[in-house]
Image (cartoon, grey):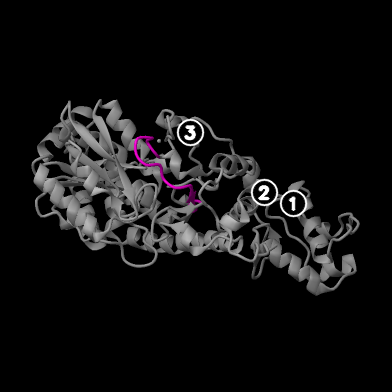
Amino acid sequence: MVIRRPAHIAADLPVPPLLAGETKQQWVYRQLVDAIHTRILGPGEGVPSTRALAVRLGIARGVVELAYEQLIGEGYLVAEVGRGTRVGTDHPQRFLRAAASPATDASVNLQSESPQGVESPPPPSTTAHPTRAGQPFIARLPDVQSLDLRSWKTCIARASRELDPANLGDADPRGLEALRVEISKHLAFSRGLRCEPHQVMVVTGIRHAIDLCTQVAVRANGGVALEDPGYPGARAIFRLRERRTVDIPVDDEGISVVALRKARVDMAYVTPAHQAPSGVALSPRRRQELLEWAQATGAWILEDDYDSDFSYESAPSPALKSQDRMDRVIFCGSFNKSLFPGLRIGYIVAPAPLLPGLLEARACTGRANPVLDQMALAGYMRTGALLRHLKKARVAYKARRDLVVRELLDAGCQPEHFQGLHAGFHFVLRLPNGADEDGLIADCANAGLLVQSLRSFWSGTTQPPPPALVIGYTALSDPQARWSARQLGLLLRDGLQPTAMFPPGGIPHQRG
């Protein structure tokens, strides 16, 4: 049983002296923050009313109200109608103190259905960070707190009731037909991609899709073209399968088809909607050129559509596969990002010539996903719960993106420094030429902020990308997003030359 102490206890705390140069608002703020950090005031405990604390401290109530507004804005306090004001359960310093230093877990970040390098790059997994929701600024993670768990549990319960012996036999390697029907409908509605259920194969996620497609679409001595900088998880899979990789530079329009035409490869792996990690969208001209290249050479295009469910400024561009008239594009996506990573359900929309080989590879290496999970997801999609979740998550993610961007703008960044804001789980913050990326990243780590440079996703074989940081924001709470962005803004102000990073006339004043 949780025992809650009455709010008046906070008003009975010892009153520290006012420090030299400290305003009364700062004095009130400091008292409460210190009490929270030392756990004198624990998560969920009430704090006195502004009137009571003003009387206790002998100051104007308006001063206390301003301090409370700041504490609420930073997530230390939560105010709710009918419940008063209390200590937040997830205030900024609490989550920052729990931050881990960079580790060698290969399963993360822009890598979580996605590894890294620099000049003479280390092995892809050696600079990855541990996957952790709530850790700024880990990229490519959804906010599992936003999931309507009641709806999901209802779908699981319904699937359990509907389970019968017919579902328990040897499963179709393509996956449950009811789920493939719902996936086909979802893709037609959200990505402009019309396909039949028999073209869809259910897999455990995008990395699983990449692995199967590598086995079937790329000859044993064949090559794969990769975006550079690009998703290191794909590179690791191609190398594990002993396929030759060719790095193709990415510019502001996406992958360079001019460079691709010079490569002798069986397949090109691309992330056209929101390039991982640069965030650029493949331009209409490049889309057409890429499809013409595949038709002319007989190569395949593997389209990784990892985050297109989250487009913030307008409807997303149609899937590249939707423009494919010659059936040269393999489309793969995942619900592990749209819903939650533990779901482990993704899908492939396969060209007709590759489908038999993919089915054989799937049947040989593990058959289909658990039937109960597939039934639950099919029901979740059929009832409209998925669309409701995506709409809710898009609003929340956009708000967090805007919080982070606003704080960085207040710190002196300019609009042109941001790239890839239109969609997804991350954006790129460009730095001035000559910026000490490694020093800045180390300073961020010391402050509990885990960021990666754009260069850490570079192979080392093409022209290096400009100095930039990859900023993930979706798995943070709003107070975490605001607090973390302010800390990053301060580090940018301290670590970069003002004339290069900030506009003429000096650095704007940082808000409290």
Please, what is the three-letter code of the amino acid marked with disc 3?
Thr
The numbered disc on residue 127 is 3
Q: Position of residue 199 (x, y in %)?
A: 14, 47
Residue tagged 1: 36
Three-letter amino acid code at the position of disc 1: Ile
**Closer to the camera, 419 or 363?**
419
Per the rendered image, the range of residues in magenta is 458-475
Q: Nearer the viewer, mark 3 or mark 2?
A: 3
| Image coords of residue 185 (percent x, y) | 21, 58
Left or right of 216 in this view: 94: right
Determine whether 404 is above or below 95 in the image: below
Q: Nearer the viewer, mark 2 or mark 1?
A: 2
Residue 389 position (above or below residue 239): below
Question: Could you say where residue 420 lies in the image, as x and y percent from the top left?
Answer: 40, 57
Mark 3 vs mark 2, CA separation in Å: 25 Å
On-image quarter of the C terminus: bottom right
Residue 93: give its label: 2
